[in-house]
Image (spheres, grey):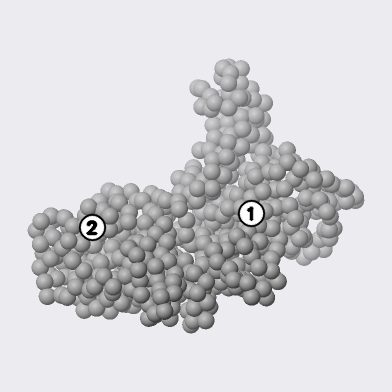
């Protein structure tokens, strides 16, 4: 049982957590000042130390170099005792299990750091074997240049060993790599060790600087996690070493590991600055849900339009012009890199209103392939009487033409030179002359159903909201049933729905996929703590709407942990509670 480590915030596999020592420690961090090593059993028999609450004690252990045969490791396996103080166990990726420790020290990290695929395999294998609410410690490998990637993969604790050794060898480390001390013309740092002339700066000073630089980089990483923007940082930071670029790309291909740990909603802006952004979980998840869950409910033609720099799109000047030309006679869907396609009903849904991209007017081949793939899948799922492409000739039109060829269909093109010219807007308006307008009621109903499909699963919109009415103004729509009981409300900040108790009961009893948290014999108020969770659905993600039920209560709230974390964690908030009724 983990008693001293609690995760507070998550950004993919990276976490902000608290190691509850006599003086609380926020991770990810350098562990030098609070780790006590009880010693290696390879050297001699070691007594289990008394331990105390002021340090994290690494229990007597046997470490193995990377690549050691598994039978050998099994033969020399250590049985770690159950102790009542903060403790860590040394494990190998192949033999890691839950020893009830608060932290796990991964043996042989020098054998797999430096190789993207090997690093990915070691971290995922270990993380899957140890409790979610325990710290992962990599010793002897951290530098200012690689620590952001280590943390993004799921590492919580590091030390300064490698950085100090590098300094004593005359290598001056920065977040971008290293310089040989003899090659420096000046000290490019303002840490205490560097507050002296270069002529007096020796190797011991260099070691001190390297340790300072590592700690400073971890401060940057922690702030990035808190703001939900570590991945934006990694896409630039990992370019400084080839194995780091390989590592984060390897993790991008591990969908189950990264997706499970990535929140479904958040406030952070997603920066699309490189082609690696296309592989981000948030991007792939949105595209997958739009093409497998979303169902168009309008009978009008599809009108494809370009995205806008301003979010949400409908508040931009260009989309205001498109709206004036379309006048509710067509179903507007925005084409964009890196998102793919965004139906008008989902323009607020994370990350559609939360991203910013580099605008050059030119699309890379990867962007064209991705958006074409998403548009093709979208049109294979949704039937339209006509497809009108009001898109620029550069990039967008080529994507449309690829989809035309793939589906053997014809689009109608309305743009001359630029989508917002008088001539182009006139073409768009005239193309829709014979189409009937859809009503405000139809638009609002289709919006809440579309969000329900996206948020809860294919068919959820019809299963939950077939006979409802809406009130208030978009984007703060409220959904009521025929008895005028409020069921749900739209949350403009994230473009999702939040249920009332009545709505939660409807959801729980409907055919729509439900995400459930089973709790013990108590009535929660404000939040449900992990120790009170009996079981939780595996597909629950941070930010998901959840039904909470136990012998004494029925409630609805928003998940603060994944389902597997809720079921196995012994500390932390599992879910917030919005409404509760006692039985």
Name the quarter where the C terminus is drawn.
bottom right
In this figure, which residue is indicated by the disc labeled 2? 319
Q: Residue at x 60, y 49 (%)?
A: 16
List x then y, in percent, for residue 440.
26, 70
**Near-viewer residue (254 or 471):** 471
Determine the image quadrant of residue 491.
bottom left
Residue 129 horizontal side relative to residue 458, left or right: right
Q: As rendered, which of 23 and 359 lies closer to the eye?
A: 23
User: Looking at the picture, how far across and down is residue 306, in whole percent?
Assistant: 25, 59
Query: Which residue is drawn at the image coordinates 33% and 73% (left, top)?
Result: 446
Occupied quadrant, residue 576: bottom right
Crowdedness near tag 1: few (<14), some (14–19) or many (≥20) residues, C-alpha within 10 Å: many
Examine the rendered structure and indicate whether residue 289 appears above or below residue 146.
Answer: below
Rendered location of residue 193, percent (x, y): 61, 25
255 in relation to 57, above or below: below
Q: Left or right: where does residue 422 sit relative to residue 510?
A: left
* Residue occupying image coordinates x 34% and y 65%: 472
Residue 263 in the image: x percent, y percent?
51, 60
Q: Which residue is mark 1?
A: 7
Q: Residue at x 70, y 52 (%)?
A: 5
Badge 2 local density, few (<14 within 10 Å), some, or many (20+)? many
Whether residue 230 sits left or right of residue 479 in the image: it is right
**Element under disc 1:** strand
């Amino acid at each position: 049982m983990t008693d001293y480590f609690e995760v507070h915030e998550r950004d993919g596999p990276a976490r902000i957590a608290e190691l509850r020592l006599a003086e609380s420690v926020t991770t990810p961090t350098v562990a030098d000042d609070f780790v006590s090593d009880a010693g290696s059993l390879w050297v001699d028999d070691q007594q289990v130390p008394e331990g105390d609450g002021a340090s994290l004690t690494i229990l007597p252990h046997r470490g193995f170099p990377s690549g050691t045969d598994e039978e050998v490791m099994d033969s020399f396996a250590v049985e770690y005792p159950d102790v009542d103080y903060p403790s860590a166990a040394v494990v190998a990726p192949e033999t890691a299990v839950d020893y009830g420790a608060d932290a796990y020290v991964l043996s042989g990290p020098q054998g797999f750091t430096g190789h993207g695929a090997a690093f990915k395999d070691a971290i995922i294998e270990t993380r899957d074997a140890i409790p979610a609410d325990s710290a992962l410690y990599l010793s002897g490998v951290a530098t200012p240049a690689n620590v952001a990637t280590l943390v993004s993969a799921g590492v919580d604790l590091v030390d300064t060993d490698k950085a100090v050794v590098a300094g004593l060898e005359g290598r001056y480390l920065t977040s971008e790599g290293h310089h040989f001390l003899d090659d420096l013309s000046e000290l490019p740092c303002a840490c205490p060790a560097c507050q002296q002339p270069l002529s007096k700066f020796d190797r011991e000073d260099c070691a001190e600087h390297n340790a300072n630089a590592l700690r400073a980089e971890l401060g940057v990483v922690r702030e990035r996690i808190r703001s939900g923007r570590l991945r934006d940082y990694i896409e630039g930071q990992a370019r400084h070493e080839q194995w780091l670029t390989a590592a984060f790309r390897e993790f991008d291909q591990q969908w189950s590991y990264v997706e499970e740990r990535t929140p479904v909603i958040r406030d952070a802006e997603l920066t699309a600055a490189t082609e690696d952004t296309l592989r981000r979980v948030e991007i792939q998840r949105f595209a997958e849900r739009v093409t497998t869950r979303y169902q168009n409910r309008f009978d009008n033609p599809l009108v494809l339009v370009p995205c806008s720099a301003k979010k949400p799109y409908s508040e931009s000047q260009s989309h205001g012009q498109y709206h004036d030309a379309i006048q509710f006679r067509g179903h507007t869907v925005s084409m964009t890199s890196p998102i793919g396609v965004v139906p008008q009903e989902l323009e607020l849904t994370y990350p559609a209103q939360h991203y910013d991209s580099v605008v050059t007017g030119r699309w890379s081949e990867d962007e064209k392939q991705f958006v074409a793939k998403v548009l093709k899948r979208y049109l294979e799922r949704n039937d339209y009487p006509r497809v009108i492409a009001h898109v620029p000739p550069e990039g967008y039109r080529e994507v449309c033409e690829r989809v035309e060829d793939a589906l053997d269909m014809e689009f109608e093109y309305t743009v001359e030179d630029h989508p917002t010219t008088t001539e182009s807007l006139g073409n768009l308006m005239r193309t829709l002359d014979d189409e009937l307008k859809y009503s405000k009621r139809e638009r609002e109903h289709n919006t809440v159903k579309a969000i329900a499909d996206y948020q809860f699963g294919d068919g959820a919109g019809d299963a939950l909201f077939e006979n409802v009415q809406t009130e208030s103004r978009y984007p703060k729509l409220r959904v009521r049933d025929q008895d005028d009981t409020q069921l749900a409300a739209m949350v403009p900040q994230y473009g999702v729905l939040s249920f009332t108790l009545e709505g939660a009961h409807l959801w729980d009893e409907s055919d729509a996929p439900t995400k459930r948290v089973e709790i013990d014999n108590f009535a929660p108020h404000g939040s449900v703590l992990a120790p009170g969770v009996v079981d939780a659905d595996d597909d629950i993600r941070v930010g998901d709407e959840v039904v909470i039920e136990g012998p004494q209560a029925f409630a609805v709230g928003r998940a603060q942990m994944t389902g597997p974390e809720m079921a196995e964690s012994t500390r932390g908030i599992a879910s917030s509670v919005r409404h509760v009724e006692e039985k």
